[in-house]
């Protein structure tokens, strides 16, 4: 049994008057892929944005309860979000590379965290990150071209490389393949498989097949509540809950 | 109606709409064309000036100088007599009246021009040179064809005797048209042939510079704070509404404000580019804040989130990513704001920039004019010479505005980054 990396306890999230998450209790194992599934608007994004405190950006968003990473409370007001986000990287639904060169996209994170002191150190980080994101071979000759000039799938791998560049422990992915074609999706899934050796990964997906392919653990959300969590095989073969059963067989959602 | 009929009707209305569009663009262009043509035809002659070629003899006796006199002596030397001698040689005059009329053909600056020629060349004492002396405004206008010579003599400013001399000079090719450097170099003058926009140019330059230095940093910082850092609540909403209101306040109100606060209360020097710059800065501030905030808003939130997600602080995400992307829009908004300030007249009139200023201001706290105010001042003058100068000044002002707007468009197109 692997270690628990992230533990949420009675997590409640409100957007103004509206409650988006209700008493979410969810454990995420180290060096494993955890998939979050559920119908649109059920709070999957809200949940993973709690893990790296991205919800701080939204004025009306209020978070109550606990999330611990390695036993350290994330919702602690004293906690430095910058170092939290250094440990917990994020990849968004729509690829959002900076409108800068490929090289600058990757080297930005290490630079602001003082990780690459010299040019050669930075070069090394850039190459390593791009290799891990399986993008190196495609872009090694045009590192100074704008990242926004890449194809959608390449852009998303660039964003993954950007997340990897600061050497995080956890990578959060919010529907990373929803804007991609099947071939690019397959590449990213392969990549996730590779990345889980080093990183703890949480992925939100609308594709059941993808959840089955990439994840070891799956959580099913509905209307802001966690309905069922368990090993991916079990969730998809014989779920305990009737709602989960209905959802994965496509009877609602 | 059948389907076909409906389709036809749709096509027809589309065609009609296109026609209206083209027609209205055509009308707009026509107006611009008429305006430009009008200004150009009136103003272009102001860039040339009429001069009369005369022979100057630097008579040592009249100058009371010897060759190799010290520079002090030269500066002290009296050129009045030489000037009179020179001008009188242009045509034989029979009596004092005729002599006076003859001298009136030349600009009042004839003496200064002769003196300048003397100072620029070495050892002219006892020598003769040919000089082109600026003609008076009347001769200038006559030569440019702006003056009706078929009026009866008593209704003309130019007498028959003078006309006669003029025709003589033309025949002997002694009258020339030169580039009018006075127009760019000189300050204002009561004599149209000597009046220039030099003072107004420098005054406008200082005013706009001060306006830029004051308004740009304040506007950019205010925009960044309001757009990126300030909490969105009633207070910031209120501020936002009022910035929009301020941008719509008529400029003359800013003039009144400056009159009361800058001149009456703080007692800054009146008629100066300093006060003009501050006044224009107040007026320009909201006009820069609005495009600046708009271009900050146009940066997609995903860029901010991307930066935050790799662990950039709020400050870093704004200054490393958002501000550089918003810069082209901000700069072009600033330039357009400054272009508006450059053409602003009303507030400057209120702070006393309508004063008659001959000297070119050397610092922003010297009394000065400015380009649009100069237009206003000259348009009130009766002399024909000022009519062309008014239009020529408008041409200068318009060309500055066009250049500034062009730079604004260029900046936006060249540096605006595309994102998906
Ligand atoms: N910024 C916000 N302001 C107000 N309400 C929000 C905001 N973001 C999300 N919500 C609400 O919170 C609830 C959960 O949203 P969330 O984005 O977490 O859903 P999701 O499961 O990620 O959906 P999807 O699969 O469509 O991405 C929704 O009802 C949504 O309307
Ligand atoms: Mg979502």
Image (cartoon, rainbow, N blue to C red):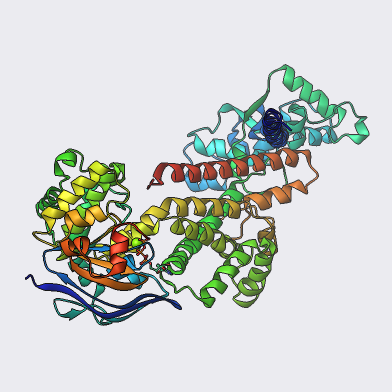
In percent of the image, x 18 and y 53: which residue is there?
Answer: A213
Vertical order, B390 against B281 (above or below): above
Q: Position of residue B104 (x, y in %)?
A: 77, 36
- Observer-nearest of B251 and A251: A251
Name the spot of residue B352 as percent of width and height, x first: 68, 63
User: What residue lies at 14% left-to-right and 52% top-to-bottom?
Assistant: A129
Does residue B342 show up? yes
Q: Nearer the viewer, residue A28 or A233?
A: A233
Quadrant where ligand 2 appears:
bottom left
Q: Image height check: is B218 above or below B29?
A: below
Q: Position of residue B210 (x, y in %)?
A: 51, 60
Q: Position of residue B59 (x, y in %)?
A: 60, 33
Does residue A28 appear left or right of residue B144 in this picture?
Answer: left
Residue that extends furthest to the left in the rendered view of this protein: A1
Q: Quadrant of residue B40?
A: top right
Quarter holding residue A81: bottom left
Residue B281 seen in render? no
Residue drawn at 28 percent across, 59 percent down: A248
Q: Is residue A91 left or right of residue B349?
A: left
């Amino acid at each position: 049994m692997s270690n628990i990396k992230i533990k949420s306890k009675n997590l409640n999230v409100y957007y103004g008057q509206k409650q988006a998450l209700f008493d979410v209790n969810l454990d995420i194992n180290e060096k494993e892929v955890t998939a979050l599934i559920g119908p649109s608007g059920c709070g999957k994004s809200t949940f993973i944005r709690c893990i790296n405190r991205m919800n701080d950006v939204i004025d009306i968003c209020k978070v109550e309860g606990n999330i611990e990473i390695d036993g350290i409370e994330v919702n602690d007001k004293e906690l430095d979000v910058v170092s939290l986000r250094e440990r917990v990287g994020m990849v968004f639904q729509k690829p959002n590379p900076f409108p800068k060169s490929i090289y600058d996209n990757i080297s930005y994170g290490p630079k602001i965290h003082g990780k690459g002191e010299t040019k050669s150190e930075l070069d090394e980080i850039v190459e390593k990150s791009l290799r891990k994101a399986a993008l190196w071979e495609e872009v090694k000759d045009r590192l100074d071209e704008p990242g926004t000039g890449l194809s959608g799938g390449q852009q998303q791998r660039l964003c993954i490389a950007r997340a990897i560049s600061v050497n995080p422990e956890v990578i959060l992915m919010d529907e990373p393949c929803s804007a991609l074609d099947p071939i690019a999706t397959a590449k990213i899934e392969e990549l996730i498989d590779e990345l889980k050796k080093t990183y703890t990964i949480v992925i939100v997906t609308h594709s059941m097949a993808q959840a089955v392919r990439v994840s070891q653990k799956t959580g099913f959300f509905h209307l802001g509540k966690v309905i069922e969590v368990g090993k991916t095989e079990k969730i998809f073969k014989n779920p305990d809950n009737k709602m989960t059963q209905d959802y994965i067989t496509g009877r609602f959602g | 109606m059948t389907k076909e009929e409906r389709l036809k009707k749709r096509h027809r209305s589309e065609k009609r709409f296109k026609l209206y569009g083209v027609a209205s663009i055509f009308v707009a262009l026509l107006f611009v064309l008429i305006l430009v043509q009008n200004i150009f035809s009136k103003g272009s002659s102001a860039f040339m000036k009429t001069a009369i070629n005369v022979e100057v003899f630097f008579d040592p006796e009249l100058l009371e100088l010897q060759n190799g006199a010290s520079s002090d002596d030269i500066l002290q030397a009296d050129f009045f007599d030489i000037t009179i001698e020179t001008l009188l040689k242009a045509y034989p005059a029979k009596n004092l009246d005729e002599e006076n009329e003859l001298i009136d053909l030349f600009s009042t600056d004839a003496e200064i021009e002769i003196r300048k020629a003397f100072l620029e060349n070495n050892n002219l004492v006892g020598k003769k040179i040919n000089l082109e002396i600026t003609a008076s405004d009347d001769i200038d206008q006559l030569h440019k064809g702006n003056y009706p010579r078929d009026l009866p003599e008593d209704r003309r400013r130019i007498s028959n005797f003078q006309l006669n001399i003029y025709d003589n000079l033309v025949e002997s090719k002694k009258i020339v048209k030169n580039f009018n450097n006075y127009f760019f170099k000189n300050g204002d003058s009561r004599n149209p042939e000597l009046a220039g926009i030099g003072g107004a140019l420098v005054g406008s330059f200082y005013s706009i510079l001060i306006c830029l230095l004051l308004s740009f940093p304040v506007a950019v910082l205010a925009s960044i704070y309001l757009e990126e850092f300030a909490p969105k609540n009633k207070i910031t909403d209120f501020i936002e509404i009022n910035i929009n209101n301020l941008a719509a306040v008529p400029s003359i109100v800013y003039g009144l404000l400056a009159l009361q606060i800058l001149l009456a209360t703080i007692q800054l020097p009146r008629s100066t580019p300093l006060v003009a710059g501050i006044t224009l800065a107040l007026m320009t501030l909201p006009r820069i804040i609005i495009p600046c905030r708009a271009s900050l808003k146009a940066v997609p939130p995903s860029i901010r989130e991307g930066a935050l997600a790799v662990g950039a602080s709020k400050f870093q995400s704004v200054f490393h990513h958002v501000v550089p992307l918003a810069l082209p829009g901000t700069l072009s908004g600033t330039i357009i704001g400054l272009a508006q300030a450059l053409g602003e007249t009303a507030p400057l009139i209120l702070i006393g920039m309508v004063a008659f200023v001959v000297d070119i201001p050397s610092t922003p706290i010297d009394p000065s004019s400015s380009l649009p105010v100069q237009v206003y001042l000259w348009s009130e003058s009766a002399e024909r010479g000022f009519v062309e100068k008014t239009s020529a000044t408008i041409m200068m002002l318009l060309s500055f505005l066009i250049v500034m707007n062009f730079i604004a468009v260029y900046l936006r197109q060249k540096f605006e980054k595309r994102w998906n």
